Image (tube, rainbow, N blue to C red):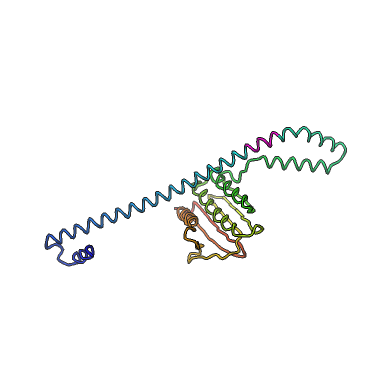
Amino acid sequence: MYFLSNTIVTMDKNWINTWRQLVSRLSISIAMFVICKCINRDFRELDEKQSLKSTNKLLHIQMEAIKHQANIITGNDEKMRIFRHDMRHNVQMLSSLIQNKELHPASQILSKLNEDLINIKPMVFCKNSVINSSLLVYINMAQNESIEIISEVDIPENIPFNSCDIALLLANVLENAINASRKQENDNREIQITTRYADKKLALVVKNRFDGEVLFNTAHMPIAKDINHGIGMNSISTIVSKYNGYMACSHEKGWFTISLMFSCHFSK
């Protein structure tokens, strides 16, 4: 009420007739200055907290990826030791089978050797190490949830966008897809990841099966039904907005699809 009364007095054509009016005007100015500073500080602290949260999430993803790769390497060392030990016997068997013209058994042994070599190779989804870490963690998480993953990823090491931002974006997209897939029957769990990079343009499409109801807002973005959900989509929107990118979501025939496009030609 004090602030309102001072404002009304200030609107009078007689700006300063008494010392009380002078005090009221000074009080309004000081109060407005303090309020603006507090609001500005709150927004700055909010941005810093969001940035710190994103950084911590990325570091956690990278640490998990490093641990997972270390476990793979340890397991691969043991597999390679066994592979080398058995190689001499396999070569002898192949030689004998080929000499006896038993080509079908020889072909089976060669297929098994090829399969063993594929399993020994480390998991690499793309050449960009930061983005690969994100994919490694969440694809492994999905597979542990019995979710089938079909991926076609092609992202080079050097891209004109911050790799950390794209890694976080993919992490949030895949996290949402995994959470949605958990609500499906085991035989209806599938996530498809497709990326394309050419001419400084990056396109990403992630699809997951979902036969439930999806609510969209006026901007055709999905609405979270639970209060604590929807944070990941907000983070995705922030990164898309940062690069003036394109995002579209749809839900058709049991598939939820999110499509994203980034280009240097329309980046800020």
Apparent side of residue 85 relative to residue 205 in the rendered image (left or right): right
**Quarter of the rendering occupied by the N terminus:** bottom left
Apparent side of residue 152 relative to residue 228 in the rendered image (left or right): right
The percent position of residue 98, horizontal first and vertical second, equals: 84, 38
Does 254 sit above or below residue 141?
Answer: below
Write down the region rendered in magenta: 74-81
* Residue lying at 51% horizontally and 58% vertically, measured from the top left: 247
The percent position of residue 62, horizontal first and vertical second, equals: 53, 43
Nearest the eye: 48 or 257: 48
Does 71 sit above or below residue 51?
Answer: above
Most extreme residue toward the right is 100
Nearest the eye: 45 or 98: 45
The percent position of residue 187, horizontal first and vertical second, equals: 67, 58
Nearest the eye: 183 or 211: 183
Most extreme residue toward the left is 18
Apparent side of residue 209 relative to residue 221 in the rendered image (left or right): right
Q: Main secondary structure of the magenta part?
A: helix
* Residue lying at 36% horizontally and 53% vertically, measured from the top left: 43
* Residue lying at 86% horizontally and 41% vertically, measured from the top left: 102
Instruction: State how many labels appear.
Output: 0
The percent position of residue 72, horizontal first and vertical second, equals: 62, 40
Is residue 91 highlighted in magenta?
no
Apparent side of residue 81 relative to residue 130 in the rendered image (left or right): right
